[in-house]
């Protein structure tokens, strides 16, 4: 009887592949185990077993597998079920979900190794120049990888050269698989076994009297061992005795000390014992009871609590209940900046039970968190993470908390799977039959609409903690201030007055400007030319700290020119302003105070966020200028004033959610002010203070905003009333994209008639030398989502089979908002 397995490969292919295995392998293998398999002519990939059966494939002959990489499954059955849902709902392949979910160290890839063929003798005269260079290099090194050849020859395509050398029998090629994850080993030492008796010890110390440093090390080893019963690390031994590791090595070589290694986690909790969670006030108690009540009839509950109402403390109580029941909890956050602040708070309560997972972690650290979650270890009972942590291998999930659920950062845009972490988490909870809490001060229209339709439970929390008043919000009309010459740079006299007052009282200030860089446009006064990115249809942003122009889409950068490229004039002027310019102006206005900036440029490092947030908490920073990173639920005790530099560029954005997003951003950033006894103040600078959204922010009227926006969505057929799928076509040839998009849209119109919008060029129509065209398919409530997707996939397949369109990349984005 023949045995076969179906596997997922980490490449975007629709179907799973079948491989042949022996009976012994069939008995050993289980779904979720990784194996390496040959694919194509020479490639070797890491694949994941999904099922074992006896049916041979009909259209091709099954190859044998290469090797088995795991002893136990690293992916659970429930995870595979979840992956299948993601692949079908977001219209991508299982391979793409696998690549997104598994830490990169788990996905081994073959690396082609080239070595010299010693059996044949080749004369140098038979080789061309580039072949000779490689052949010569192989005399000095036994083997080279393809990457090495690229750098030696300084060429992208080295395959022709390899092929010619193979034809001449000069080299041999093989594929090797590398296990990328290396456990972190820590060196420990103990006294050699032959010196454990008292007499032997006496002799040893007498012998070492001539080597005082070696004697010091042995004495230190005794004293550390006496204090703690734990094993002694080499690093501790050298720092305690004030000697170097060379002396330890000498003692090991003599056999006086023995070394051994213990595997440890890279991310560990170093802290004191846990403290008890805070007592809830009456409003929080009531909200907690209401959540538990709504859980009786609903699986999902929306907690709508104003900023600084103490939602986190309610979550802590819910987590405590789950930990008592020995269940795992997933706590999702939109920003890494937020995890840094929250980790500390949760670790104070739950100690080492908290594990953190996000993209700033190294590949090895992610593997460790993965293994801890998989083994349901005590160090991963509460998983705190950004959107990717939805894909971890939970064993016994009891609760999912999605904090700041309205955030757009929960949506993955590139690469596939283009999932939304909130919706994906809700499905994960239903697989585990557990509950989900969505929390926000400004819920997304979809969630609030679902709560109003009684699909979700709704719990309101309208009082700030300690009954602190909501901040006083004032709108400043900068059009009027410009007329009256009352502006200094981008600061109105009102803002300067309030800032002076706040700093005098020893409080801190946050200034919000949703653009990084110094200024978005540099323009020539004489001819009006503005430097553009060569790869994208967008002007370059000036970054003063590096004196360069940068493209925020593709990363292209160039030195800031001294003269205009078009007419040679020296009169270059910058238009608009970003965080850098606000920071510079704040430094000039308040030279004796510390001004710092928090945006993508200043938080690139692994601990970038922590440094800035800690400095603000410790009071080292007086004025913090930042982009939307600052708005996400951070808790700063001493911030009294928040200034929004320009509210208009958010409101006038070409997107159906612009007004909803602006309300959320401004309400959230206002919520950073006055979180202790004193009432905070928020100043919003705008050219149009009578705008509805600004009026709603100033009165903190979420319900009015919700109702108005929902009316608009009804009229113009947008979510949550209609669903949306966005189809993007990409290619470097302008005409080809145009023709392809027209064909695609025509085909869609034959099926969906008036519910197809486009094709249309987006505001930035070319990115990284690729022209983009968008088509929107709107799906009414009565229309079946599954049938709609089937029809789109059919059209997509026939599009790909047209020879002229094959090179056009098509991106399907479900719920693209």
Image (cartoon, helix red, strand yellow):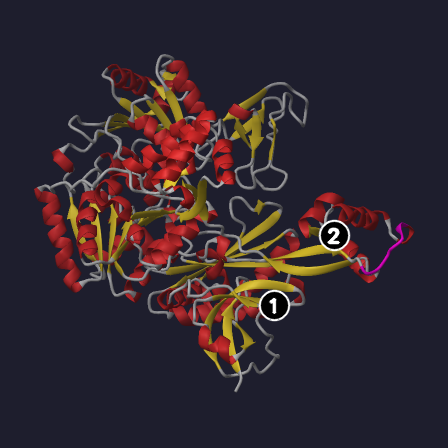
Residue 123 is one of the magenta-drawn residues: yes
Of helix, strand and loop, which one carries label 2? Answer: loop
x and y percent of residue 184 in the render? 45, 46
Q: Report the residue marked by disc 1.
A: 38
**Mark 2 or 1, which is nearer the eye?**
1
Image height check: is 62 above or below 598?
below
Q: Report the residue marked by disc 2.
A: 158
Magenta segment = 119-124
> Hey, which quadrant is residue 328 in on the image?
bottom left
Image height check: is 120 above or below 225?
below
Q: Nearer the viewer, residue 502 or 699?
A: 502
Query: Which mark identifies residue 454?
Result: none
How far is the residue under mark 2 from the one under mark 1? 22 Å
How many residues crowd mark 2 within 10 Å: few (<14), some (14–19), many (20+)? Answer: some
What secondary structure do most residues of the magenta stretch adopt? loop
x and y percent of residue 206 in the render? 42, 30
- Please give the name of the residue rendered at 53% of the width and 30% of the height, measured from the top-left corner: 521
Residue 21 is one of the magenta-drawn residues: no
Q: Nearer the viewer, residue 497 or 106?
A: 106
x and y percent of residue 5 in the render? 50, 75
Image height check: is 492 above or below 76?
above
Image height check: is 596 above or below 701?
above
Of helix, strand and loop, which one carries label 1? Answer: strand
- Please give the name of the residue rendered at 66% of the width and 52% of the height, measured from the top-left corner: 733
The answer to whether one can see residue 791 in this image is: yes
């Amino acid at each position: 009887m023949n045995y076969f397995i179906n596997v997922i490969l980490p490449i975007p292919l629709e179907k799973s592949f079948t491989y042949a295995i022996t009976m012994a392998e069939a008995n050993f293998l289980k779904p979720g185990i990784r194996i390496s398999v040959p694919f194509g002519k020479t490639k070797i990939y890491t694949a994941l077993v999904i099922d074992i059966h006896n049916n041979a494939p009909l259209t091709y002959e099954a190859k044998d597998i290469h090797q088995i990489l795991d002893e136990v499954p690293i992916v659970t059955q429930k995870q595979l079920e979840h992956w299948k849902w993601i692949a079908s709902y977001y219209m991508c392949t299982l391979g793409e979900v696998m690549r997104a979910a598994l830490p990169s160290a788990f996905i081994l890839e073959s690396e082609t190794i080239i070595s010299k063929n010693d059996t044949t003798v080749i004369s140098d005269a038979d080789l061309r120049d580039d072949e000779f260079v490689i052949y010569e290099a192989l005399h000095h090194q036994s083997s080279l990888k393809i990457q090495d050849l690229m750098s030696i020859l300084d060429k992208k395509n080295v395959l022709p050269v390899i092929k010619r050398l193979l034809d001449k029998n000069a080299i041999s090629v093989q594929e090797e698989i590398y296990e990328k994850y290396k456990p972190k080993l820590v060196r420990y030492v103990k006294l050699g076994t032959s010196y454990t008796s008292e007499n032997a010890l006496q002799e040893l110390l007498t012998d070492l009297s001539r080597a005082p440093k070696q004697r010091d090390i042995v004495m230190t080893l005794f004293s550390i061992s006496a204090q703690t019963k734990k094993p002694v690390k080499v690093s501790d031994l050298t720092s305690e005795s004030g000697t170097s590791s060379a002396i330890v090595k000498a003692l090991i070589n003599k056999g006086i000390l023995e070394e051994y290694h213990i595997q440890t986690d890279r991310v560990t909790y170093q802290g004191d014992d846990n403290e008890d969670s805070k007592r809830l006030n009456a409003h929080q108690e009531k909200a907690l009871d209401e959540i538990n009540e709504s859980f009786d009839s609903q699986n999902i509950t929306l907690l709508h609590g104003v900023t600084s109402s103490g939602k986190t403390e309610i979550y802590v109580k819910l987590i405590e209940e789950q930990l008592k029941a020995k269940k795992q909890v997933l706590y999702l956050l939109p920003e890494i900046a937020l995890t840094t602040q929250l980790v500390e708070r949760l670790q104070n309560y739950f100690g080492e039970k908290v594990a953190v997972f996000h993209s700033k972690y190294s590949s090895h650290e992610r593997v460790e968190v993965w293994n801890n979650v998989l083994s349901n270890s005590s160090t991963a009972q509460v998983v705190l993470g950004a959107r990717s942590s939805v894909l971890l291998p939970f064993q016994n999930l009891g609760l999912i908390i999605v904090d700041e659920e309205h955030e757009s950062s929960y949506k993955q845009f590139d690469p596939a799977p283009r999932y939304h972490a909130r919706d994906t988490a809700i499905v994960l909870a239903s697989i585990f039959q557990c509950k989900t809490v969505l929390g926000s001060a400004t819920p997304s229209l979809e969630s609030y609409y679902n709560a109003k339709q009684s699909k979700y439970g709704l719990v309101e929390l309208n009082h700030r903690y300690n009954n602190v008043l909501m901040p006083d919000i004032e709108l400043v009309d900068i059009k009027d201030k410009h007329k009256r010459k009352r502006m200094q740079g981008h600061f109105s006299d009102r803002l300067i007055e309030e800032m002076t007052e706040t700093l005098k009282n020893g409080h801190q200030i946050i200034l919000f400007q949703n653009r990084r860089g110094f200024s978005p446009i540099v323009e020539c006064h004489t001819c009006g030319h503005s430097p553009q990115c060569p790869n994208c249809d967008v002007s370059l942003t000036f970054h003063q700290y590096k004196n360069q122009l940068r493209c925020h889409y593709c990363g292209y950068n160039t030195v800031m020119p001294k003269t205009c490229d078009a007419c040679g004039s020296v009169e270059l002027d910058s238009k608009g302003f970003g965080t850098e310019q606000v920071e510079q102006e704040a430094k000039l206005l308040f030279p004796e105070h510390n001004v710092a900036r928090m945006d993508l440029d200043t938080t690139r490092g692994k601990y970038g966020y922590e440094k800035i947030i800690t400095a603000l908490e410790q009071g080292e920073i007086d004025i913090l200028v930042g982009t939307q990173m600052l708005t996400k639920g951070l808790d700063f005790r001493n911030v009294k004033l928040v200034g929004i530099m320009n509210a208009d560029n958010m409101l006038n954005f070409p997107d159906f959610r612009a007004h909803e997003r602006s309300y959320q951003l401004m309400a959230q950033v206002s919520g950073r002010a006055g979180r202790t006894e004193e009432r905070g103040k928020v100043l919003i600078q705008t050219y149009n203070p009578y705008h509805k959204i600004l009026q709603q922010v100033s009165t903190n009227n979420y319900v009015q905003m919700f109702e108005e926006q929902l009316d608009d969505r009804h009229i113009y057929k947008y979510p949550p009333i209609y669903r949306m799928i966005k189809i993007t076509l990409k290619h470097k040839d302008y005409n080809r994209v145009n023709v392809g998009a027209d064909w695609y849209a025509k085909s869609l119109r034959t099926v969906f008639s008036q519910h197809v919008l486009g094709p249309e060029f987006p505001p930035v129509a070319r990115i990284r030398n690729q022209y983009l065209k968008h088509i929107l398919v709107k799906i009414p409530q009565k229309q079946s989502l599954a049938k709609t997707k089937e029809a789109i996939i059919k059209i997509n397949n026939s599009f790909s089979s047209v020879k002229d369109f094959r090179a056009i990349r098509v991106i399907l984005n479900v719920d693209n908002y």
